[in-house]
Amino acid sequence: MRILYGVNGEGLGHATRSQVVIDLLLRRGHDVRVVASGSAFRYLHERLPRVEEIFGPSFAMDEGEIRRWATLRQNVMAAPRELPETVRHWIGVVHDWRPDVVVTDFEPLAALYARSALVPLVSVDNINMLVRCHHDDGIVGPELADFILARAITRAMIPTAGDYVVTTFFRPRVLWGRTTLVPPILRPEVVEAEPERGEHLLVYSSGSHALIDALRATGMPCRVYGMREAAGSGEDGEISFRPRSTAGFLDDLRTARAVVTGGGFSLLSEAVYLRKPVLSAPLHGQFEQHMNARYLEREGYGMCAPEPGLADLDQFLRRLPEFEAALRGYEQDGNRVALETIEETVSAAADDSRRRRRQARRLARRAVS
């Protein structure tokens, strides 16, 4: 089976998830070619064969908040310069190699190619949770305008797919057919990790002085990644600023008592899988993070606090036994269910497409005769 796989380049969550899926498809003998932009291209190009770089949108950030109009402006300015060359190269790549099916992890050009070439399209991501499922007022909260905008952007980014596989650690009601909810796709290192109950907080955040002061006031050991104050590493009382390290971060996550982070889906999923309570501070202007954090709180796995201070941290720490009890009831068999579902969905889409083509050829021959 020939599979074209498009990967969104904003952040690394799309890339790490897609690598797990693509590795499986390659092991099963499928011919997979990948197109990706930004950081996803750089990550996957080092780890997979046949990865092509394409133009992709990016977000403009300021002090941890998405600037909507700056984001629109920078992408509108970049597209005329970069998109034509991307399209020309794209045509050259796929002209003599017609895929049986296209899979997109929120990557728009691969999806547009699928619709224009009448090739089956399968969407595999967590973002279509915004569109494919129902979210009540408690989840939408005061961010109704952000919710409407996020849904509109999600619909605009990806043309209507034939099938949607949505990764999630929570289970709202599905609104539309041919939508399957599966557990999050985790890095193999996370699946293999043995969680231990330590006494430190793992903190991953762009941070603020107020958060640092609140962490210091708790008196708990804190291992901090991503703070602007921590260009390298260093100690500040019980606060240990850590340099970027994939292995070091995972070990600190595996042995943490709890996690303080934003509302990004990947780290929340890893923390839930390892049964670590989370205090989630979603980014302003990014509704998906607010949604993730509120569902996390609703499931009893932690708290949502957009601007966490000492009162929020104190409440979070007092409730840790409650969150730990809820997390003990979470069930996920590694990546098995998600990967089996994706392969079955992709294979079924390709088989259906081949049947339709054979039927069209038979009808054409009958019309000629």
Image (spheres, rainbow, N blue to C red):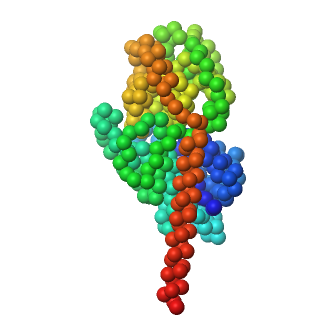
310 sits left or right of 349 in the view: left
Seen from the viewer's position, the closer of residues 295 and 212 is 295
Q: Position of residue 197 (x, y in %)?
A: 58, 17
Residue drawn at the location 34% of the way across and 40% of the way down: 135
Does the rendering let one see residue 304? yes
Q: Position of residue 180 (x, y in %)?
A: 46, 48
Label tally = 0
Q: Quadrant of the N terminus?
A: bottom right
Seen from the viewer's position, the closer of residues 296 and 280 is 296
80 is higher (above) or lower (below) than 259? below
Which of the 4 quarters of the picture holds residue 242?
Answer: top right
308 is higher (above) or lower (below) than 356? above
Q: Position of residue 145 (x, y in %)?
A: 31, 41
51 is higher (above) or lower (below) than 143? below
In the current view of this chain or complex, which residue is farthest to the bottom?
A: 369
Residue drawn at the location 38% of the way across and 28% of the way down: 298
Q: Position of residue 202 (x, y in %)?
A: 56, 21
Residue drawn at the location 51% of the way across and 71% of the way down: 356
Residue drawn at the location 52% of the way across and 65% of the way down: 352
